Amino acid sequence: MQAYNKSVFNLKLSKSIVLTVIGFLFIFTASFSFSYLFLGKLIFREKRQEIVKEIELPQTPTPYFGETQKEEKTKNILLLGYGGKDHSGGFLSDTIILLSLNKEKKTACLISIPRDIWINLPLDWENLKAAKINEAYAIGIDDIKYPNKKPEFRGKTGGGNMAKYATNQVTGLSVDYFVSVSFDQIVKIIDTLGKIKVDVPVSFTDEYYPVKGLENETCGKTPEEMEALKQKYSGFELEKQYKCRYETINFQKGIVEMDGTTALKFMRSRHSPTYGGDFSRSQRQMAVLKAIKEKLISLDAFSKIDELFPELASLVTTDLNLPTTKDLVSFLGKPEEYKINEINLSTENVLTESKGPQGQYILLPKSGFGNWQDTQNFIRKEMEKEL
C-alpha cells in the first residue's frame, strides 16, 4: 500500500464523509452496474410526453407498518443523495438506495428506488399527500412549510425518517439507519481524499452542462428576441437557445483521474446525445462511487472510526452515532467478502409509467397506486437468489 505522511493522512481522512459510513456502505456498490438510479436494466423513455396513461387513485394501500423482512443478521441502511441548497430543487433526493447487508450470507443487496415513484407521504398527524418519493426528504426537513408533522418527521433527522417511511412502504423492509449527503459534499470528499481514478465506461460529450451562476444569463439577446424564443420553444429546447449558460464537457472511455469538481460534472451530466439520460447517469455515479471505494481501501480508512466520526457527522445528516457506527463496522466484518446483489425496480417488472394530477411523469406499481405487495414480493424473491 502506498505510504502516507501520518499527519496529512489523518487530516484527509478526518474531513471525508464517506470514510466510515458512506464509504463503508458504498463499498458494496463497487462492482454493480448501476442502472437507473442503480437499476440494472431500467431504461426510462426520454420522451416522457408520449406517456398517455393517467393516474388511477387508490386501490389497496400497503400499510406502513405492514409486513416487513428484518432479521438480526441483516442491517438496512438508506442512502440519499441530493443536489444541495445552491441547486434547483436542492433537497429533492436525486439518489435513493436501500442497502441491505446480510452478515450470514455475506451479501449486499442494493435496492434502487426510482425518484419518480408516486407515494403517499404524511404531511401532518391526519393527512397524507400523494407525491414523488424524492420529495420525502425535502418535506421532512422543512418544518416551516410543513409545521404540523409528527415529531419523528421534524428536526434534523425528519427528512431521513420521512424517506425511511416512504422506503418501507415500497420495499416492505424496515430501515435501520439513513445517511444523506449533497453532491457538493461529495466534491469535498474527493478533494480531501485526493484525486480518484474513475473507470469511464463510455466516451461521451455533453454540450449543455450548466455553468453555475449563469442560469439567467441573457447571452446578449434583447427582450424582444427572448420573448420570440419563448413563443417558439419550451422546456429544455428553450434553454438550448441560451448557449452561454452552458459549457461543453468531454470524457474518454478508460481510467480518468478526477478531482471533486470534475467528478461532479461526470456524475451529473444529463444531455449527451449518446450517453445522457437517467440510465447512463446512474452508471456514471456508480463509477465514481467505485473509485471512492478504491481510494478508501488504499488509505485504510475503515480502521480510523474514532478520529473520523466528529468530522464525518459535520458533513452528513444521519441517525448513526459513533457507537452505532462502530457496531455496524464490527457487525459486517470484512467488506471485501461481500457479494453484490442488485435489485431492479423498473417498468420491466413491477412499475408502470403514468401521469400525475399536474401532468408530471410518475411511476406507479402495476398492481395499482398504493398497493406495494407485488413489489415487496419481487424484492423478497430477488434477495433470496443465490449469487
Image (spheres, rainbow, N blue to C red):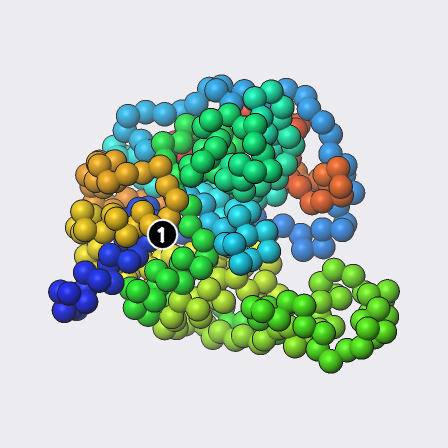
Does 291 appear above or below 248? above
Q: Is residue 30 left or right of residue 203?
A: left
**Quadrant (top left, top right, bottom left, bottom right) of the N terminus:** bottom left
Residue beneath the point at 71% across and 63% down = 236
Q: Is residue 371 left or right of residue 376?
A: right
Horizontal and vertical percent position of residue 38: 48, 49
Does 303 appear above or below 154? below
Residue beneath the point at 68% across and 24% down = 58
Horizontal and vertical percent position of residue 383: 40, 34
Q: Is residue 239 left or right of residue 208?
A: right
Q: Which residue corresponds to mark 1? A: 315
Task: Give whichever of 87, 59 is nearer the camera.
Answer: 87
Does 322 appear above or below 47? above
Task: Give whichever of 13, 382 is nearer the camera.
Answer: 13
The residue under label 1 is which amino acid type? Answer: Leu
Task: Give whichever of 344, 176 is nearer the camera.
Answer: 176
**Quadrant (top left, top right, bottom left, bottom right) of the C terminus:** top left
Residue 359 visible somewhere in the drawing? yes
Residue beneath the point at 28% across and 58% down = 15
Horizontal and vertical percent position of residue 364: 64, 35
Q: Is residue 51 left or right of residue 77?
A: right
